[in-house]
Image: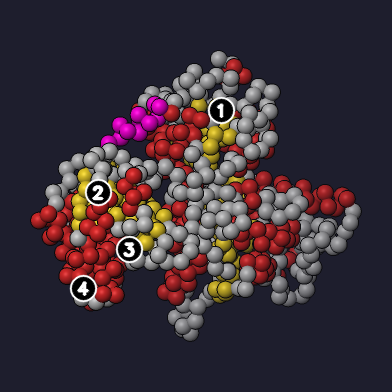
Amino acid sequence: MRAAESRKCSAAQRNIPTKGELDRMNSDRAPGVNEFSIGIATRNGSGSQTANQVILRSIFAMGVPVGGKNIFPSNISGMPTWFYIRASAKGHIARSERTDLMVCLNPETVAEDLANLGAGAVALIDEAMARHATRQDIVFVIVPFGKLAEQACPDRKLQKLVQNMVYVGVLCRLLGIELAEAKAALGRMMGKKSSAIELNAGAMDLGFNWAVENAKALTEFRVERGSGTSGKILVEGNTAVALGALFAGVTVAAWYPITPSTSVIEDLMHYAKRYRKDPATGKLDIAIVQMEDEISSAGVVVGAAWAGARSMTATSGPGIDLMSETIGLAYWVETPGVFVNVQRTGPSTGLPTHTGQGDIELCAKASHGDTRHICLYPTTMRECFDFAYAAFDLAERYQTPVFVLTDLDLGMQTWMGEAFVYPEAKLDRGKVLDEKTLQKIENWGRYRDPDGDGIPWRTLPGMKGGKGAYFTRGSARNDGALYSEKAEDYRGQIERIARKIDGAKEHLPAPIETRSTKGSRRGLIAYGSSDPAVAEALAILAEEGQPFDYLRVRAFPFAKEVEAFLAAHEEVYVVEQNRDGQLANLLADDFPQLAPRLRKVTYIDTLPLPAEAVLRGIAKADGPKADGHKTHGPKADGLPSGAAR
């Protein structure tokens, strides 16, 4: 079938599953041993996060792959919050739309929480809310959480907190989680707080013993010891990024607090106090400075890098907005700097505690005028560490701002991943002239290109003799850093910088391709936190005899492998967590001749992406008309938009 004809086919003719087929495929994925999803509904500020982490870490300690998703509000305490734990021996740890067991502790949401459960699910519900236990198609376990908390702790102020450990004990009994592992996890989290450990462990025992006497252990789904977590760790992406920067030798971090990036710098401070102290003086060898806003933070990053420091900031989309003018300055004057963007839902203030991938185009082209920035898109915790480390080398090698783009899901949730590997390679400071070498150069100019790769040689301030001095300006200049309004000088500089950035492609993290066993004319592209859901969705489709080849993009500008993947497939579905299909737009810009092959699969529900939404999005995404005009969607860019809601 010719490509033009293929684009006019219906979803059924292209063998893409219909919505009804997708619903059936999803219902067939019944829970089982080490395959289930737990939901815990509480209030923000109730102290439930320690309990939730105990459950997650206990399952992990028993050798079962697991992931956790904290869905929490951005406003004051007392608002509803949910925590979801996905256990999967198959390694599928994306959020699931199906909840197999729900712990209901919030009277404000209990009716909705129960209504959202499918037939056959299990609900743990406080006896004070027993009137809601009316459905006949789910199993109710009515627990006297309040009374058990009173037995565990006479202090009424602490009973609400202790109640959380009661449900840990109940879940351990029902699901077969070893109580010893739960107590070990509690001990690791509370450290040397022996009285707190004793109190919470006692509450755990009360819940466990109550369940032994009053409830049957679940047989449909439960935890059994496995080996799927051997060599793995549990960590948050923001922590991984902070450690990567620390190992990369960051010496200046300027920041302004903003959700969801704040813990990047907080963790950097924590680890710097442990590992970046001068043993002789006891002083830190890193400056971490909270500025009055994001604009000044960006100024410190660029100024410190100009002076020779390895500098960074961590922010989110609103911060990048404010930093854009300074980022453009750094791009033009060719000064390094690492900008970590932990994306959240926008525009404007948006939803600060909800995730998204809405800053892809913003970071690729931040600032006015012609700019094109190096962007890294980590997916795993190991990549969060590695890419943060690599960003400093890339920034100095190419003398330019480099973005590391994660999101709230990657940054603030607990992920299972490979242990980090100590970087053995020497730090790459790029083309920096020392005094001796500079004296041998007869006609040095800051922005000249003697090597033909677009990368000039730079000097650092303070070099003796004055030969390396130059005036850094945001206005137009020639290759000697002298002010110039000549068209040929501007054209030469802006084109050289573009050539420099384009030349970085081969040194950026290469995309990772996963080919179906039989190969397919259909491909799928995704990046970042979308990967776990995409991998699960593609596994489901493969089981149904509908294989896709998959390319996970890890950097911009795009490598040659990306163009080759597009050229090799008649249809390429681009899965993203934004409305407009921003990565697909960048692909269309770079490869316009291949743009008609792109299909946008967009997800804008602001929660971590589930496999079910990927499947629906693939089914919904239409092909563009043969004349290249848009079929539907928000942008007249010749690309369709299949919103995966």
The earlier-in-sequence mark between 1 and 3 is 3
Q: Secondary structure at mark 1?
A: loop
Q: Which residue position holds label 3?
A: 48
- Relative to 133, 71 lies left or right: right
Neighbours of disc 3 within 10 Å: few (<14), some (14-19), many (20+): many
Q: Nearer the viewer, residue 33 or 314?
A: 33
Which label sits in the foreground, 3 or 4? 4
Q: Which residue position holds label 4?
A: 153
Q: Secondary structure at mark 2?
A: loop
Percent position of residue 388, x then y: 52, 58
Q: Residue at x 48, y 39 (%)?
A: 645
Disc 4 residue type?
Answer: Cys
**Which part of the image, by quadrant, shows the N terminus?**
top right
> Is residue 477 visible in the rendered structure shown here?
yes
Distance from the alpha carbon under mark 3 to that under mark 4: 16 Å
Q: Which residue position holds label 2?
A: 133
Disc 1 residue type?
Answer: Asp
Q: Are marks 1 and 2 in contact (CB under 8 Å)?
A: no
> Is residue 567 visible in the rendered structure shown here?
no
Report the magenta residues as a range: 20-30
Distance from the alpha carbon under mark 1 to that under mark 3: 43 Å
Percent position of residue 605, x then y: 49, 45
Distance from the alpha carbon under mark 2 to that under mark 4: 28 Å
Q: Residue at x 54, y 68 (%)?
A: 257
